[in-house]
Image (spheres, rainbow, N blue to C red):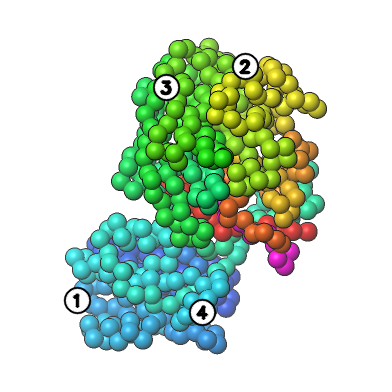
Amino acid sequence: INAEYGGRKLLMKERVIIFLLFSLVLAEFDAPIFSFYNFDRQDNLVTCTTAGVQYANSNGYNYYGIHGLVPSNETQTPGTVSLEQYYNYERQDSLCVASEEGKRDAKTFNYTFIRTEGWVFPNSGPDKIPMKLYWNAQRQDNFLVTTPDEEQLAISSGYVFIRIEGYYSNVWSAWPNDPPPDIPFPRSTVIKGLEFSTKWAAYGGADTWYPTEGADGVLYTPWTDGTVNGVTSFSGGSKPTTGYAHAIGDDPLNLTINAVNVFVSYATPYTGRYPCGSLYYKGVWYYGTYLLDNLSPDGCGNWCTQGPFVGYRTSTDRGQTWKEPRLLLTGWNDTIFGESAQNNKKVKYGAPHVIDFGKELEFSPDGKMYIIGHGAVRPDAPVSWIQGDQVYVARVIPDIETINDISSWEFYAGNRWSKDVSQAAPLFTWLNRTGVVTQTYIPALKKYITCVTTPTFSPSTVKQFDTYLLESDNITGPFSYIIYMREFGPEAYFVNIPSKFMATSVADNYFEFYLSFSANFAFNKQPPNPPSGGYHWALQQSRFVLS
């Protein structure tokens, strides 16, 4: 990628082409599905061959990503049909089709056959992903979409669905483990790695999705800083809003988002108030918020000061109405635990999230609700919404009358629990390397999985982020690390594992689940990695590789 040729640095375009050609060589019998777009022609191009990539490069097409694999054009795989490239010179439109109807239409509308790109499956089945053809009459452009974000782009750009042309196979790939030398955890001997498939879904145009499942099977989730179903929320300023919604369905790739709305509250004397841990339990929706500001002079770029946890507002009618005990704050420490970020004070329970024990605390070890958050005690520690030194846990019996009473809470204090928040001790410490943290219990593995996201380049909150996953037998550890993913997203955050979309058992030494996250709100000038990354709610099919 950083090579020189002829005494000069390679241009980014040249680097991309080298990468694509290497991908074709390494694919052997499978060919990557490449997407390109030509702004002058307003033409979407999908190709799976070296010839197609070379044509795109020499004719002004912009590369947009690799979206799966198909059997290459060298040898037909049994049970497949040809994926064929056509071109209409009058319209300047590329058309990639596999169905008999698509091939007939190509000839009817004077498209010229160019080449066979590869082979695809004509029918759906397990681990098969559809290739959908869309058409824009104004642009005179056919668009073969292979991923959810491409489909959203097509629809928002005025394209209409024509047909499914074929299906390609779901492919799994391992994310490399690349931990810093000072990682304080031993490597897991139970879970060896993490793989992602080409199956994923994207919902909304916002972030901060933390779903909690009710007994009715509905996912109740916060969201903010964007637009969902035409409703907009922004959690910065003195009078911020926080969004909420229901996600309906059992298939993570085909959810319906409804009951979308926002709640107006106040952040003063802070300048931001954001959603955090959420729990639906026995008919009550507990919705947490926390505070942010830019009081630190370290130049992190975005919300450099992690403020305290405010507490919970509650709803007994699934979000139609809310009771908020701290609509207005009376001061810097008018919060549930009395913490404050004034005058460079550090909080322990920054952006706490409810530990996911399954539907309505099904697998809670004691029937209590636990929260997990990040913070620090060092005066010079950079503590932002995405960075800290430590991770802390607290617990409470969820009750609408006492949830916001500090005397109802217990704080993990080492080998004991304390009613005094000042006695709270960290689960673990890693200077400058903690950040947004979530935890989920996996019954099939009898393990707690902790997800932590932290800046790649401390203390920047607007560049790449790293994410690492830990496993433990208990909520409080000890912890072993599964994987350290550098530049995941490359700027993924709010990573969590919704228990609703986990397998109930291990299969062939793998455990499957869906990873939930948002990505690239600021660092968005390069293709997402994995492709599911984007400014939306991403649900990425994933699996652990077990020992």
| Marks 3 and 4 in Cβ contact (< 8 Å) | no
Query: Which residue matches tag 3?
Result: 327
Query: Which residue matches tag 1?
Result: 90
Give the Cα distance between marks 1 and 2.
67 Å
- The circle on residue 72 is 4
Q: Position of residue 482 (x, y in %)?
A: 71, 49
The three-letter code of the residue at mark 1 reads Glu
Q: Secondary structure at mark 4?
A: loop
The three-letter code of the residue at mark 4 reads Ser
Q: Write the residue at 20% across / 68% down.
A: 137
Report the side of 32 relative to 45 (left or right).
right
Q: Nearer the viewer, residue 43 or 209?
A: 209
Which circle's residue, 1 or 4, is located before the other in the chain? Answer: 4
How packed mark 4 is, by other alpha carbons closer than 10 Å (few <14, some 14-19, many 20 or more), is: many
The three-letter code of the residue at mark 3 reads Leu
Residue 403 in the image: above or below residue 510: above
Q: Secondary structure at mark 3?
A: loop
Report the side of 442 relative to 288 (left or right).
right
Q: Nearer the viewer, mark 1 or mark 2?
A: 2
In which image quadrant can residue 451 be found? top right
How packed mark 1 is, by other alpha carbons closer than 10 Å (few <14, some 14-19, many 20 or more), is: few
Q: Nearer the viewer, residue 50 or 306?
A: 306
Query: Which residue matches tag 2?
Result: 379
Give the Cα distance between marks 2 and 3.
30 Å
- What span is in magenta? 507-517
